[in-house]
Amino acid sequence: MPSAPLRILVPIEFPEHENALLRFAASLAATRKGTLHLTHIVTPTSSTSNQAQSFLENAAALARQQGVEAFAHLYASPTVTQGIKEVVKRWQCNMMLMGWYHNIEREVILSAPNRALTKELGIDTLIFKERDTYPVRRFLVPTSGGSHAFMGIQIAQELATHTGASLEILRIARDPRCRPDDPRLQRYCAQLYENTRLQMDLLEIEAPITVQPAVELIPAITSKVNPGDMVILGASNDWRQEEHLAGSIPDEIANKVPVSVLMVRSAAPDPHLLGNIFWEKNIRLDLSPANKWDAIAQMVDILIEERQVPQSQRDNILNAALEREHKSSTAMGHATAIPHAPIPNLPAVIGAVGICPSGLDFDAQDGGAVRFIFLLLTPQQNYRSYIPVLAQIAGLMRAPDTQQALLDSQTPSEVAAHFRNYKAL
């Protein structure tokens, strides 16, 4: 997917002491020629230094020396939380990067004034816990396959490309006995590798994947960390609660590893996101295309017929989808393919679903036939908007009973009900 420019809000609590955060912010912005808004919120009760503006200006100047557009702001507001919300809206920021300087403990988090921001802002949010490990030689991304982890992998890949560091993806196969000769464990490891590789293919990212059998998750991850690493973790579900940082697996890892950690939370998707994208009128139950190219054309025509996109744009949309498919198959396993295309000035993700009961050759890596086609058109200016959608489709189609339930559906309404009822973990 093409990259949209980043407009990163960096809330600065202590302007004179956050060099590491600022340095990382500049690297992050440079991956996509982004803009930094270095902001210190002044409240009626804050003890802001008289030199705060000067420190912010110097930081912005250093970022500009690295080729990154940067602005320094002292912003007055009744509270830090309200100020950050206002700044995000005022400068149309699409990402926030915060530093974390305490132990990640429940009591500390619950007393933090910005603890609920990750839920409320509706933008990608990163929390950086720095341990002076620059320059980074390897970005290590432990993942369980969720939408936050998807975003973490993309950020890691962009940073690795920009800095020349390596990238490695880590999956942990938890097993209480963890016997290497156990055929069930071997099959589980093979499945984890296959699923992760399929996800990487969807993201169009190439990187080595390590699947590590282990009895306990956290020791298995921390044992893989080397000096010079930066660990990038997708947020846990705890981030959706008031104590969004307290007591989760990412928190424990962040406290135990001796290197810098970046925790990533993609903008919160609607829990019924699939139901909001794949409406009844955009679902077809009995497609019988001649081949996958014909299938993609028929899927585009569904959106034309239902007036989701204008007829005048048919060729542009079809060519974009076909161009993506020529790069590599969008078959993701589990009898499912997700052809997709970035479209300029599209206001939101638009989708259609086609069910091919007899199966279709989609050049899948596993050699299996595709029976379920999800076409996604995504806004070119907000390319990450498709990540949680991909994650939810993958989660839905991996569920044991989903495929048969969809094949047994007699009407588009029945299919749409499965999408509405699906709740991502």
Image: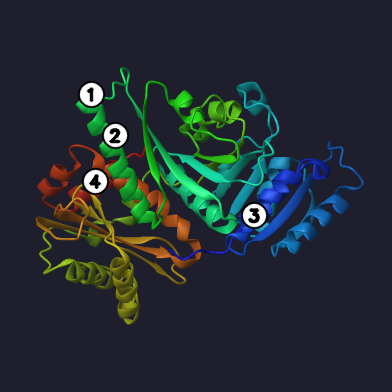
Q: CA distance from mark 2 to mark 3?
A: 34 Å
> Which of marks 3 and 2 precedes in the sequence?
3
> Which of marks 3 and 4 precedes in the sequence?
3
Q: Are marks 4 and 2 in contact (CB under 8 Å)?
A: no
**Neighbourhood count class around disc 3 (C-alpha, 10 Å): few under 14, some 14–19, many 20 upward:** many
The answer to whether residue 243 of the structure is visible from this angle is: no
- Give me the disc on residue 182: 1
Residue labelled with disc 3: 27
Residue depth check, mark 4 versus mark 2: number of the one nearer the observer: 2
Residue farthest to the right? 50
Please state which amino acid type lies under the numbered disc 1. Asp
Please state which amino acid type lies under the numbered disc 4. Ala
**Neighbourhood count class around disc 1 (C-alpha, 10 Å): few under 14, some 14–19, many 20 upward:** few
Please state which amino acid type lies under the numbered disc 2. Cys
> Which of marks 1 and 3 precedes in the sequence?
3
> Which of marks 1 and 2 precedes in the sequence?
1
Residue depth check, mark 3 versus mark 1: number of the one nearer the observer: 1
Residue depth check, mark 4 versus mark 3: number of the one nearer the observer: 3
> SS for tag 2?
helix
Q: Is residue 166 above or below residue 338?
A: above
Residue at position x 71%, y 50% in the image: 23
> Which of marks 1 and 4 precedes in the sequence?
1
Residue labelled with disc 4: 417
Return the x and y of residue 16 as percentages of the image width and height.
Answer: 83, 44
Residue nearest the viewer, comparing 228 with 33: 228
- Give me the disc on residue 189: 2
Residue nearest the viewer, comparing 97 with 200: 200
**Number of callouts in the render?**
4
**Neighbourhood count class around disc 4 (C-alpha, 10 Å): few under 14, some 14–19, many 20 upward:** some
Q: CA distance from mark 2 to mark 1?
A: 11 Å
Return the x and y of residue 306 as percentages of the image width and height.
Answer: 26, 69
Residue at position x 15%, y 52% in the image: 368
